[in-house]
Amino acid sequence: MNVVEMRNITKRFGKFTANDQINLAVKQGEIHALLGENGAGKSTLMNILFGLYQADEGEVWIKEQKVEIDDPTIANRLGIGMVHQHFMLVEPFTVTENIILGDERTSGKIDFRQAEKRIQELSDRYKLRVDPRAKVADISVGMQQRVEILKTLYRGADTLIFDEPTAVLTPQEIEELTEIMRGLVREEKTIIFITHKLKEIMRTADRCTVIRRGKVMDTVNIHETDEKKLAALMVGREVSFDLSKQKAQPGKSVLQIDQLVVKGTDNSNVVDGLSLDVKAGEIVGIAGVDGNGQSELIEALARFRAIESGTIRVKDQVINSFKPRKMTGLGFGHIPEDRQKRGLVLDFTVSENMILQTYYLPPFKKGLSIQYAKADQFARDLISEYDVRTQDEHTLARSLSGGNQQKVIIARELSREPELLIAAQPTRGMDVGAIEFIHRRIIDHRDKGGAVLLFSLELDEVLKLSDRLAVIYEGKIQGWVNPQTVTEEELGYLMAGGQNVVAKEETESENPI
């Protein structure tokens, strides 16, 4: 039986058609993937199913009954829950308080003890391992996602929608989420999940519907397809999974970090005596399990976080006390880990976001005013060059899909041709075609003499792009490896805190710290 049918769904935003006569059928007890490029219309379609948007045309059928879903409350009553890409949790509240928020089933005093008991039972049943009394601010991103899953189960969801569920998770958390999804299906739940990651689809899904530019291309059984076929359906052309590049030609040192110490929120040394250097014309990658000081190191380099001791030099200038704008003037570019918190002003237009780093410079500044016509033309050029899927340059950044928000940041940063680029999770939330394009742009930037320090939790990405690769563990460089020859086992051993003597001996002479 089909638990969800969406028939001839069309949704327009002004002149832009996000969904164009889409048909989708989801069977009881399956994991059904929605695959498509950034801005293809996947999230729009699921927001219609969840009642956040209303379709301009078409019908929704739930368990063979035609329904009108005007808001998420109705969706909940129909057994539909949604775990959003950007979690909707109140950080100072406990897990229990977040889960019952908006669903307090009482006319008087809230029975927190009963709610905690029920949440604990659901957590145990579905092996989510969530503490109902923990504060959301104190738990990991992966655990916050489990809270969102519990929230849907608490409201009685039989069909769960996951929007880009692995976009902010570590590899270990992704494996755990996969097991959770399989466990939910064993308990007769149905899952629809939106993703760009072909490997996840092949490993997890039963069927996959591919959407391109608002239209359904096909629905396929996973055991009858492969990654290359799915990629071609998604982007309309053959996609290369290999990344060819010339050998790096490193020049002068652009970034030098010497014995850097950075404190965390608990006053411990999260970056603990770390040293490395990055030269012009090379990509230095940083690999490591999330939470080993990467975020704090990035924030220190971008001058968002104070330095306890040690020095950071950019082009031989000590920048320990610099402000972020002074870093920009020094030729510093930054693709941040969190695009919404650090990379964009969500209520600014695409055009305004494109000039965030340069609005006070010619040609955008004239006297005390901004030349908006020039900013708009600049934005239109970058929108075309980077294939940003948007109505126009005046669209608010918050209206774009996550992958297209990422394209705006990357276009802005690379267009300035920075001498030093800090790239943190540069392709997070992007489709395979966009990843191929961005990887090529980063390599082109290196070939023009740019220095790149790359942070990525995607081991494939960091191995493909890096000319030199350092492994970070507990705030220190654990070792250097050759990304062309290192095995996953050797890399995993270093990432877990092991010592790789062979890798150190091979690279010591060419990687002086």
Image (tube, helix red, strand yellow):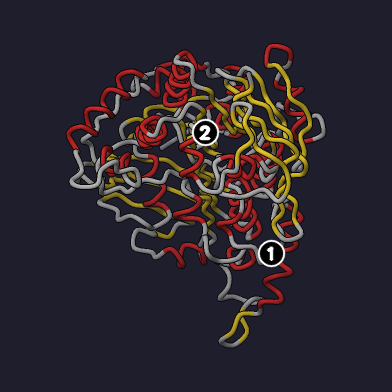
- Towards the viewer: 500 or 132: 132
Amino acid tagged 1:
Glu
Q: Which mark is residue 385?
A: none
Disc on res. 162: 2
The kind of secondary structure element at disc 2 is strand
Task: Give the image location of residue 387, x and y in percent.
Answer: 73, 50
Looking at the image, which residue is at 67% across and 48% down?
55
Whether residue 336 sits left or right of residue 238 in the image: it is left
Q: Quadrant of the N terminus?
A: top right
Q: Nearer the viewer, mark 1 or mark 2?
A: 2
At horizontal 22% and vertical 28% (from top left) the residue drawn is: 117
493 with respect to 107 (left or right): right
Q: Position of residue 63 (x, y in %)?
A: 59, 26
Crowd around label 2: few <14 · some 14–19 · many ≥20 (10 Å) = many
92 and 78: which is toward the camera: 78
Instruction: Look at label 2 and name its amino acid.
Output: Phe
Q: State whether residue 55 appears in this view.
A: yes
Sequence-wise, the earlier of marks 1 and 2 is 2
* Residue 33 vertical placement versus 429 (above, below): above
Q: Which of 310 and 83 lies nearest the eye of the viewer?
A: 83
Mark 1 Cα-neighbour bin, 10 Å: few <14, some 14–19, many ≥20 = many
Dividing the picture into quadrants, the one containing residue 370 is: bottom right
Picture layout, residue 91 above or below residue 390:
above
Of the pair 69 and 436, the residue shown nearer to us = 69
Q: Which residue is mark 1?
A: 393
